[in-house]
Amino acid sequence: MELRRSWQRLLGLWTDRPRRKGTLIAGRYTIHELLGMGSYGLTYLCTDEQTGRDVALKESKPSKGKLAARLLAREADVMNRMDHPAIPDLLDSFTYRGRRYIVIEYIRGQTLEECIFEQGQTYTQRECLELVSQLLTPIAHVHEQGFIHGDVRIPNVILRNGQVHLIDFGLARRMGEPLLPELKRRLREMPEPDDERAAPEQDLQDLGHFLLFMLYSAYEPEKGREPASWQEELELTPELHQMLERLLGLRPYYEAGAAELQAEIEIIRLKMR
């Protein structure tokens, strides 16, 4: 079994090699650089030769076969239902030489992961709340369309001119839909139980972890101090502390969803003035 897995990894490294700069896809999209590589797809910065605009082109991984193509088709279907300025537009979806592709509006900016870990950016509690408040609007829009995003994390939030944009809908699901059996087997890091169906609280709990990452950007541990829980390490206002515990399931949940959370954020921000 271990030998088989090693062979599959080597095969994947060979078949999933990123395409070269200058490669033309479907006679229209010229590749400039690889933006990222996920479990099931490779994303490139391209020029759309018909319009002259920069776009993000996502290609199914050959080593993942029909599952990767199926996931990209699902992602395209979800994105086609979204209409929000903080969510990139789906521009095209097609199959070319046996691979599935989707073309998405390119959001020029930096992910919050890059801001924190590459640039060393830190954020105050007020700034963290502002970003979470902004992010709640596209999340609420996704919920209103009957879906969850399923992957609200700092690598999937782009900051451009002070405004956040929610990207990567590869794990989005319709409300009540269970995780695909193939993903249960392959995405072992998924924290949710196998039988849990998509619900808004999953995105809000992810938002709680997102907020923790943001708050820790400004945390400087005391020399010689043993690591402790976030409740002990972070000096938060009582209201923000309680909000985080609610998001993370340590206190009663936000039954009214994003609207209730947004109202609580506004109250906390007013008290910080």
Image (cartoon, grey):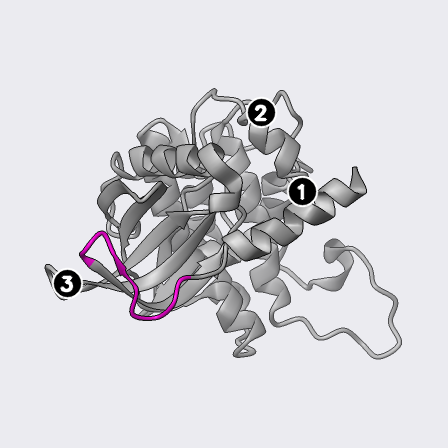
* C-alpha distance separating marks 3 and 1: 39 Å
For residue 5, above or below residue 16: above
Decide: marks 2, 1 in contact (CB < 8 A)?
Answer: no
- Measured along the vertical axis of the image, is residue 221 above or below residue 67? below
Pointer 3 residue = 49
Mark 2 sits on what residue?
181
Nearer to the camera, 109 or 162: 109
The residue under label 1 is: 189
Horizontal arrangement in the rendering, residue 261 relative to residue 227 (left or right) = left
- In the picture, measured across the screen, residue 177 lies left or right of residue 160, that is right
Is the C terminus in the top left, top right, bottom left or bottom right quadrant? bottom left
Task: Label 3: state its secondary structure.
Answer: loop
Q: Is residue 61 visible?
A: yes
Which mark sits nearer the N-terminus, 2 or 3? Answer: 3
Name the residue nearer the viewer: 9 or 75: 9
Q: Residue type at mark 3: give it.
A: Glu
